[in-house]
Amino acid sequence: MQFDKELDARGLNCPLPILRTKKALADLQGGEVLKVVATDAGSVKDFQAFCRQTGHALLANEEGDGVYTFYLKKRA
Amino acid sequence: MAKKLAIIASKGTLDWAYPPFILASTAAALDYEVSIFFTFYGLTLLKKDVSDLKVTPLANPAMPMPIPMPTLVQALPGMESMATLMMKHKMRSKGVASIEELRSTCLESGVRLIGCEMTIDLFDFRREEFIEGIEFGGAATFFEFAGEADVSLFI
């Protein structure tokens, strides 16, 4: 998937992946895509909840070898 | 309109320092307007130096210990420092944020941090001991924002 910026949140525990994501999104324009990689298993539910509450679109989340990848499209 | 979160932080140990700062920083990331009122022992969480926050297994039987430890042993000199070192090491190895990082994230994201005036007076603290960017106030100040909050927590 195409993305405009990547955030490495591997090794970080709750709530750091979300806090770093919020910061990273601030540097993007509406409609641009942020890719986040994390290892916190709780981040799957948290990213879904984050997107539902903030209006950013969670385009995809993938899992493999204990690494979770999220693609967030910044709200307009 | 943004949702509002009001928190009272009343405890000043390393473990209890986490819930107010985690919830406040996360709520701010979710576009909440957040205010935290720091009172009694919680006020120490606004001091410039929070590296000396401690955790104690005493009167805290749910704290996981590497080996079973009788309560009297937990009261021996040095045990508190040891438990604190263990906890900090564990937190680092698990990628848990430091209190300093969570607190500065709160400040950067516009969380209002309010220190209790009465506590400053009670414990003879000086305002210079506290970080920049905070306010001071009393119970009425708390209710000014808590009265309009969607979520109110006492921690």
Image (tube, helix red, strand yellow):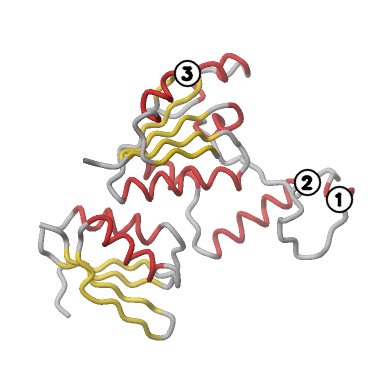
Examine the rendered structure and indicate whether residue A47 appears above or below residue B52.
Answer: below
Q: Which residue is mark 2?
A: B58
Question: In this rendering, is residue B107 above or below A76?
Answer: above
> Circle 3 sits in a helix, a strand or a loop, which is it?
loop
Q: Amino acid at mark 3?
A: Gly
- On the image, the x and y values in percent for residue B16 come to 59, 44
Mark closer to the observer (2, 3): 3
Residue B121: where, in percent of width, then height? 57, 14
Of marks 1 and 2, which one's residue comes earlier in the chain? 2
Residue B83: horizontal and vertical position, in percent? 72, 52
Q: Earlier in the sequence, mark 2 or mark 3?
A: 2
Residue hosting label 1: B71
Q: Quadrant of the N terminus of chain A?
A: bottom left
Residue A34 is labelled as none
Type of the residue with mark 1 = Thr
Q: Residue at x 49, y 62 (%)?
A: B95
Please determine whether, in this image, residue B70 is positioned above or below residue B93: above
- Residue B100 lies left or right of residue A1; in this view the side is right
Residue B122, picture quadrant = top right
Q: How busy is the neighbourhood of tag 3: few (under 14 within 10 Å), some, or many (20 plus)?
A: some
Residue B50 placement, left or right of B68: left
User: Where residue B129 sits in the image (x, y, percent)?
Assistant: 51, 24
- Judged by depth in the image, the label closer to the viewer, 3 or 1, is 3
The alpha-carbon separation of the residues under discs 2 and 3 comes to 31 Å
* Label 2 secondary element: loop
Q: Residue at x 55, y 43 (%)?
A: B17
